Every structure is written in structure tokens, then in C-alpha cells.
């Protein structure tokens, strides 16, 4: 007799009442076992989520052009953030993700939240840098009014630093003149742009911030490009940081204006391979270069 047959035979041989009681006991035991299993499962902690890993994954997706998927990772990182540092990284990454799509409006809530947090902490220098980063996202997106607003916010916040040194004050003033010159150039106001360039040069010539010298030919080249002086733009931009994908794209755009497609393509290709940084310069450069020459 098979095991199943034996079991049926044994149950059949029991008195009816006993068989019913045995069934009830079996059901109760089974229910208790199921409940115990559920309690054990509930007692197990959910798998841990590392916000830093999510941010890194999202950044890689941004660099590959997978912006919507990247923002899902950043949103999860924000939910899982267990420290202000983790939250700040997720907020900045989310904002820069929108920079890849030239979306100043969508980036603003994330950077502005971080700005307000830093301001409340009295971290005025860091708050100013965050405001300037948002302004950079906005100017690259063509949202010039928002860019000017946030550059001014950054300048004001930076100057609130307690016991600020003359060198630090010069740094913020240089950045402010630099920003105003670029925005004026984007608006086609050459005279205004030149005036701000001159002020920026005066500040730089004080020698208090020698590390900012590399940003001056970037400024003059940018202004020349957007005001139609392409030969000057090329000469100046070639003296700026040649390892910056943003500068490489400006040079490529200048070559396009000069009718040299081959050199333009060369610089667009450089911009695709120079940097894997998740920052505003790369957020501007990579989508543009990819559009011009593809993913190769």
C-alpha cells in the first residue's frame, strides 16, 4: 500500500468525531506554524540601501544619457539618506541630472533646498557655491534671468562669511563680474560685457587669487564667442583649461563658426572622453557632443 493510501486508511479507521477533532488540531497547528513563519519574516530587517551607491549608479546613468532612470536612483537615495551629507549628495546629483537636459526650472528646487540648509547652518561660503552652481546650470540652459538672480544670491551669501579675508572678498567679486560679463554677452550686450571683463581683470590683477587666472581666458573667449569675434574667441579659449569638456565644446563651437567642421568634430570627440565628472561643465558638454558626433 502506498503512503498516501495508508494515510487515508488510517483516517478512515478513526471514529467520526475523532477524525473531525484530528482535522481541527491539524488546521490549528498549520495556522500556528504559518503565523510563526510570518512573524519570523516580519522580524527580519529589510535589505539595507546605501545612498552613496544609489548616487553613483544614478551618476553613471546620467553620463550614459539615461536621465529618467538616473533620477529614480537619486530619488531612492534621498529617501534612504540617513545623514545631511548623504542628502546633500543626492540633492546636488538630482539638480545636475536636470542640467544634462538643460532644465534650470527642474533643477532649482533641489539646489535651492541645499542652499537654504547651508545658509541656516551659517555655512555662507558653501551656500554661495551652491547658489553659483545653480546659476551655472541656468546660464547653460539659456535661463539668463534665473542665472543672474542666483549668481547675485551666491555673491551675497559668500560675502556674509564671518571675518571674511580680503582675498575671499576678491574671489566673490571676481566671480560676480565674471558671471555678469557672460550673461551680458549672451544677451548681445558687448559694451556691458566688456565693462565687466575689465572689472574682473582689475580684481585678478591684485594677485589675491592666482588660482583664478585660468578662468580669465575662458571669460574673454566666452564673451568673444557670443559677441561674434570668433578669431579672438579661439585664441583665448585655447589658453583656458584644455582638460575641461566645457571649454572643449566652446572651442568646437568656435571652429563651427569659423567653418572648420573637422576641427570642431575633433573637439566634440574630446569632450566625450575627457571627463566622467558629474558636474555642470560635463552636463553641458556631454549631451551637446553626443548630439554632434554620436556615442563613438
Image: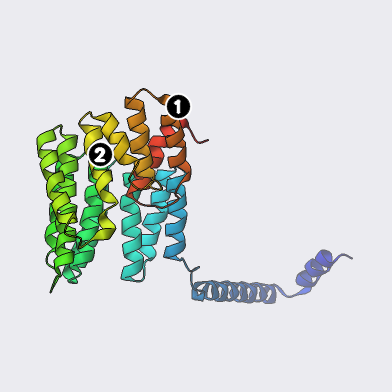
Give the residue pinned by disc 2.
Answer: 222
Whether 180 is drawn above or below 160: the answer is above
Horizontal side of residue 283 vs 3, given as left or right? left
Q: Earlier in the sequence, mark 2 or mark 1?
A: 2
Q: Quadrant of the N terminus?
A: bottom right
Q: Helix, strand or loop at disc 2?
A: helix
Q: Nearer the viewer, residue 238 or 187?
A: 238
Whether 144 is drawn above or below 205: the answer is above
Q: Residue 96: x, y in percent? A: 33, 50
The residue at 18%/65% (across/down) is 168
Q: Helix, strand or loop at disc 1?
A: helix
Q: Residue 76: x, y in percent? A: 40, 58
Whether 108 is drawn above or below 53: the answer is above
Q: CA distance from mark 2 to mark 1?
A: 21 Å
The residue at 19%/60% (across/down) is 171
Residue 262: numbered disc? 1
Label 1: few (<14), some (14–19) or many (≥20) C-alpha neighbours in 10 Å: few
Q: Residue 20: x, y in percent? A: 65, 72
Q: Residue 260: x, y in percent? A: 39, 25
Amino acid at each position: 500500500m502506498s503512503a498516501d493510501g495508508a494515510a487515508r486508511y488510517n483516517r478512515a479507521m478513526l471514529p467520526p468525531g475523532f477524525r473531525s477533532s484530528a482535522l481541527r488540531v491539524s488546521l490549528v497547528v498549520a495556522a500556528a506554524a504559518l503565523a510563526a513563519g510570518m512573524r519570523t519574516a516580519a522580524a527580519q530587517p529589510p535589505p539595507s540601501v546605501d545612498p552613496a551607491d544609489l548616487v553613483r549608479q544614478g551618476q553613471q546613468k546620467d553620463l550614459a544619457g539615461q536621465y529618467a532612470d538616473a533620477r529614480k536612483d537619486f530619488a531612492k537615495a534621498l529617501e534612504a539618506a540617513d545623514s545631511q551629507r548623504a542628502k546633500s549628495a543626492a540633492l546636488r546629483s538630482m539638480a545636475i541630472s536636470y542640467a544634462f537636459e538643460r532644465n534650470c526650472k527642474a533643477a532649482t528646487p533641489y539646489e535651492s533646498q541645499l542652499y537654504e540648509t547651508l545658509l541656516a547652518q551659517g555655512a555662507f561660503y558653501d551656500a554661495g557655491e551652491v547658489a553659483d552652481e545653480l546659476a551655472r546650470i541656468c546660464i547653460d540652459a539659456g535661463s539668463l534671468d534665473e542665472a543672474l538672480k542666483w549668481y547675485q544670491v551666491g555673491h551675497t551669501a559668500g560675502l556674509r562669511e564671518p571675518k571674511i579675508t580680503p582675498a575671499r572678498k576678491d574671489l566673490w567679486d571676481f566671480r560676480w563680474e565674471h558671471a555678469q560679463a557672460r550673461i551680458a554677452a549672451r544677451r548681445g550686450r558687448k559694451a556691458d560685457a566688456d565693462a565687466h571683463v575689465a572689472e574682473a581683470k582689475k580684481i585678478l590683477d591684485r594677485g589675491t587669487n592666482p588660482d583664478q587666472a585660468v578662468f580669465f581666458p575662458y571669460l574673454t573667449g566666452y564673451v568673444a564667442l557670443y559677441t561674434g569675434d570668433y578669431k579672438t574667441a579661439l585664441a583665448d579659449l585655447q589658453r583656458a583649461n584644455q582638460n575641461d569638456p566645457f571649454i572643449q565644446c566652446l572651442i568646437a563651437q568656435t571652429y563651427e563658426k569659423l567653418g572648420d567642421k573637422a576641427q570642431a568634430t575633433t573637439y566634440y570627440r574630446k569632450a566625450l572622453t575627457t571627463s566622467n565628472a558629474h558636474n555642470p561643465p560635463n552636463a553641458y558638454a556631454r549631451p551637446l557632443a553626443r548630439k554632434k558626433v554620436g556615442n563613438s
